[in-house]
Image: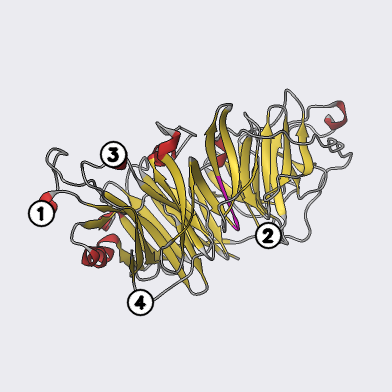
Amino acid sequence: MHVIDRRTMLTGSAGLLGLGLLALAGCARDQPTPSPTPSMPDTIDAVLSDLLLTRRFGQEVTTSTAFYSMALVAGRVLLYDDTDAIEGRLAVLDAASGATLWTWPQAQPAVAAIDPALSAFSPSELATAGVGAETILAASTYLNPCPQNAAICGSEGLDRTEGRGVAAFALDSGELRWHALLVPPVDAEDPAAERRRNASTQPVGGTDDVLVVRVGDAQLAVSGGSAPSDPLDAGTVAVSAVDGSTVWEQPGFVAATVVDDVVLGWRRTDAGDAMVVVDAATGDDLWEAEVGQRLVGPAGGAVVVEAEGAAWLADARTGDVLVELVDDTTRTPAGIELGTGVDGEPLATWVRSPYSETEDALPGYRLWSSTGDAARPGAEELGDFDIPTLVHDGYVWCTDNDRLHARDRSGASRSDGIAGIMRGVEDALLLVETSGGFEVYEIA
């Protein structure tokens, strides 16, 4: 393990995976009493003000977004592109001015100084974490086993396997903070050598105390719930945010995201793939969901659990049901979004049309929502393609025919529409992806 003198702490940020697509499994829940259908819809939310979106800057990055990712973190725009349109494929920009703070080649010399055979991969999954004035960007590392550090060599004649690890860099400068070799090389004759050759590491996210990393064959599980070739080859390690030392390990558990003090992931069982919620500090299992269920969140200390014909809001740490959101076997909506309300409480939103006689007085598509109370429809009718994409501080950001705008819980519009796809909102800044680039807007 290599530690730079300056130490730092990490705090949670979600990975970029869509958990709503992952199948869940586990113990059965207590069936709550369905929430009554309200007779009166939500009207315009007087607490929220209209938003003025002013373009600060933008940049054309690539004509293809197939391998393109971006994030808005701690007042910084993180850009990745594997077409080399960006120098070194990764750039960190000041979100207020658009100035480039550093690019990936600037981070490489410090890594090579640890070991000439060590290199760090430009992170395509932008796993970040931070606390106070500094935020950390984590990246996978590779220790080359080839003689004379050759760029290309076969496995024949090598006397050791490759090594895999993770490095932490200061987000504002690209300076190396520490490096941890999580999968050290072993002799080629070692019984574990073959399994080590299939190993990989991928940072997921962090808390104030730990950075969570997928280790082993878990790299195959980065999207769509695809399973590793062997559950024993997949696992998760949490390392200290101070020096990269190992805090806990969970073989067979594939971490997907870290938010607040919990880690969401999945584990293969005899009954199927089980979605599991784990304590980020200890690695202990907190709870599981049933086979066939999906999990959205967490946010505001809660998650949304979606099942066939039902959806409910549950406590993120215990799985206890807070309120039933939907209970209908034929008209359960897809794409429930979970974020935070005005006071930081969980706010779940979705769109659907009426499906009962009592709702027929509210024709057309409506924005439904709940903050732990009975789900209510909004008073404003929405268009067929007006879809919630992100919920933050009480505002529901919706996309309608590639135009993004903010609404309140009633469905009333709270901003003009802008062209682009939502990529992040933070404080008074909004990041959107455009055709071949991005734009940052100030929110006032």
Q: Which residue is mark 3?
A: 191
Identify the magenta region.
Answer: 260-264
Q: Residues within 10 Å of mark 2 (few under 14, many from 20)?
A: some
Question: Where's residue 414, x and y in %?
Answer: 67, 54
Give the number of the disc on residue 50.
Answer: 2
Circle 3 SS class: loop
Circle 4 SS class: loop
Whether residue 9 sits left or right of residue 359 in the image: it is left
Q: Which residue is mark 1?
A: 148
Whether residue 348 sits left or right of residue 3 in the image: it is right
Q: Main secondary structure of the magenta part?
A: strand
Question: Where's residue 218, x and y in %?
Answer: 42, 40
Cα–Cα span, label 3 and label 1: 25 Å
Cα–Cα span, label 1 and label 2: 62 Å
Q: What residue is shown at x 61% (from left), y 35% (from top)? A: 385
Q: Residues within 10 Å of mark 4 (few under 14, many from 20)?
A: few
Whether residue 9 sits left or right of residue 195 in the image: it is right
Q: Nearer the viewer, mark 4 or mark 2?
A: 4
Q: Which kind of residue does numbered mark 2 sit on?
A: Asp
